[in-house]
Amino acid sequence: MNRKFLLVIIVLASIGLISICYLLAASGKPQPGASPPSVTERLSYSTKIAEARRFVKENRHNDSLCFLINMNVESGSNRFTVYDIKKDSVILTGLVTHGRCNKNWLVGRRYSNEPGCGCSSLGKYKIGKSYMGKFGLAYKLHGLESTNSNAYKRYVVLHSHGCVPEGEVNPAPICQSDGCPTVSPAFFDKLAKIINHSKKPILLWIFDDGVVSRGN
């Protein structure tokens, strides 16, 4: 009798545990304190990574990492990603400006490749040589597509500026540039170490994944 009673208790306890696990799994709701979605999940990089991997191999760029900028992300959120191509993981993230297209303040996004437009240009870039300019150390950018082929003559470069915060400030926006992808001084220092250490050119890819709802 005691063995039968103990067996019934074990069976009921098992059923109860399975039911609780099922309800938690079926709810689909994140639990308090759960980690937010990863950068790769949030920016849906899977197709971009596959193309970047192919591009760097075919064009003799650094095949270990690349720089990705998703202009669809709000400017107050980290949208500049240093991505480890071989390990499929994020190395660094930071804030980056977009061009104001010669306006005092550009609402939303506009892209252009025309000289003097003051806008960001979408497309793949090769990070070139460093030089000292009016913003200090900067890296020349060579546009590799029809959408950014005038980047070099437009003086679109990778540089830093103190107006860019070190951490995310979304929903507040950050400052805007005249077309250059501009980052914070501390983040730039980290990028510079990566660039200077690389024996091959690094791919910088500025893209907009096409989601309509974007503001800052």
Image (cartoon, helix red, strand yellow):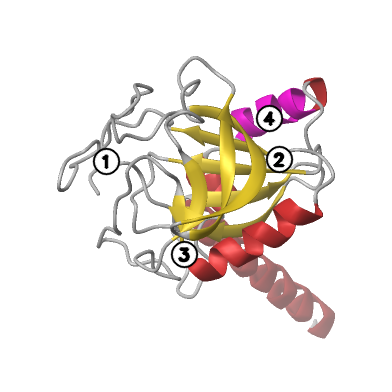
Q: Amino acid at mark 1?
A: Arg
Q: Is residue 150 visible?
A: yes
Residue 200 at what x, y percent from top left?
A: 81, 39
| Tag 2 residue | 202
Density class for disc 1 (Cα within 10 Å; few <14, some 14-19, many ≥20) is some
Q: Which residues are magenta?
A: 46-56
Q: Residue at x 75, y 55 (%)?
A: 196
Density class for disc 3 (Cα within 10 Å; few <14, some 14-19, many ≥20) is many
Magenta-drawn stretch contains 54? yes
Q: Amino acid at mark 3?
A: Ser
Q: Is residue 27 visible?
A: no
| Tag 3 residue | 184
Between 131 and 59, which is closer to the camera in this rendering? 131
For marks 1 and 4, give the CA distance.
Answer: 25 Å
| Tag 4 residue | 52
Instruction: Of the two numbered discs 1 and 4 on the same chain, state the one appearing first in sequence.
Output: 4
